Image (spheres, helix red, strand yellow):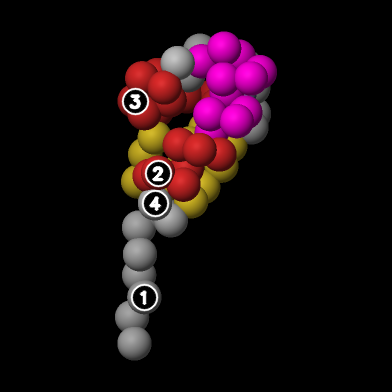
Amino acid sequence: MKTQSVTKRFKCADTETNCDWSATAKTKQDLIEKVMAHANKKHGMSLRKVKVAIKDE
Ligand SMILES: [Zn+2]
């Protein structure tokens, strides 16, 4: 059985921070929640910016 699901990845450094924090999740929604908890709190990053920086792995 193949369970090759796409992982979503966010790297803080892909935005204009010098932060080396990153996160992955199975779904975009999960990842957005994780990322916002970090990026919004630490960097005041907007949801829009977070979404743009999310990539498939
Ligand atoms: Zn960061």
In magenta, the rendered stretch is 35-45
Q: Between tags 1 and 2, which lies in front?
A: 2
User: Image quarter for residue 48?
Assistant: top left
Is residue 26 at all visible to an observer of this figure?
yes
| Residue that mark 3 sits on | 52
Question: What distance separates the C-alpha of mark 1 from that of mark 3?
Answer: 26 Å
| Residue that mark 1 sits on | 3
Tell me the residue at 39%/35% (across/down): 54
Question: What distance separates the C-alpha of mark 4 from that of mark 1?
Answer: 14 Å
Q: Between tags 3 and 2, which lies in front?
A: 2
Is residue 17 at all visible to an observer of this figure?
no
Q: Is residue 36 magenta?
A: yes
Tell me the residue at 62%/28% (across/down): 38
Tell me the residue at 56%/20% (across/down): 40
Circle on res. 27: 4
Q: Residues within 10 Å of mark 4 (few under 14, many from 20)?
A: some
Amino acid type at circle 2 is Gln
| Residue that mark 2 sits on | 29
